[in-house]
């Protein structure tokens, strides 16, 4: 299956690209995030934790936060666009 992943903020620096198109066997968001963490070691522990999506990281599918869908169990479809945005803190 072909999935487009778009990275924002520090994730873009970690991956070295704004956007990648990935051929994957992942069927759900959690599997895709695991694959990305393995492929890009700088992302390890920043996308997933023991409770699901790590911290305040925002992962969207079709511009909807997957936490408001089925979380890491959100199903993927051919040509989905997944956006990954790290939490941003500051003052």
Image (cartoon, rainbow, N blue to C red):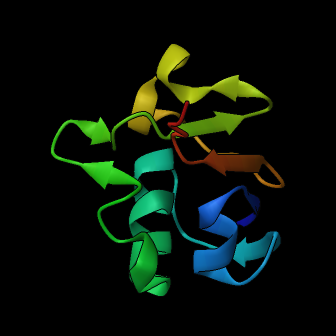
Residue located 34% across and 71% down the image: 44
**Residue 76: percent from left, percent from top:** 63, 45
Task: Give the image quarter of residue 13.
Answer: bottom right
- Is residue 54 toward the left or the right of residue 21 in the image? left
**Residue 75: percent from left, percent from top:** 56, 38
**Towards the viewer: 10 or 75:** 10
Residue located 50% across and 72% down the image: 36
- Is residue 12 toward the left or the right of residue 40 in the image? right
Quadrant into which the N terminus falls: bottom right
Residue located 61% across and 72% down the image: 24
**Towards the viewer: 66 or 90:** 90
Task: Give the image quarter of residue 3.
Answer: bottom right
Can the viewer see residue 25 in this picture? yes
**Residue 12: percent from left, percent from top:** 69, 69
Can the viewer see residue 28 in this picture? no
- Is residue 59 toward the left or the right of residue 55 in the image? right
- Is residue 3 toward the left or the right of residue 51 in the image? right
Residue located 48% across and 22% down the image: 67
Quadrant into which the C terminus falls: top right
Q: In this figure, what is the number of numbered marks?
A: 0
- Location of residue 59 with respect to 68 vertically, above or below: below
**Residue 78: percent from left, percent from top:** 78, 54
């Amino acid at each position: 299956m072909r999935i487009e992943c778009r990275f924002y903020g520090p994730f873009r620096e970690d991956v070295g690209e704004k956007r990648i198109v990935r051929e994957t066997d992942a069927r759900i968001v959690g599997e895709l995030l695991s694959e990305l963490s393995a492929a890009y070691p700088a992302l390890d522990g920043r996308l997933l934790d023991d409770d699901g999506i790590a911290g305040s990281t925002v992962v969207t599918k079709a511009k909807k936060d997957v936490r408001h869908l089925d979380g890491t169990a959100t199903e993927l479809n051919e040509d989905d666009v997944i956006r990954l945005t790290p939490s941003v803190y500051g003052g």
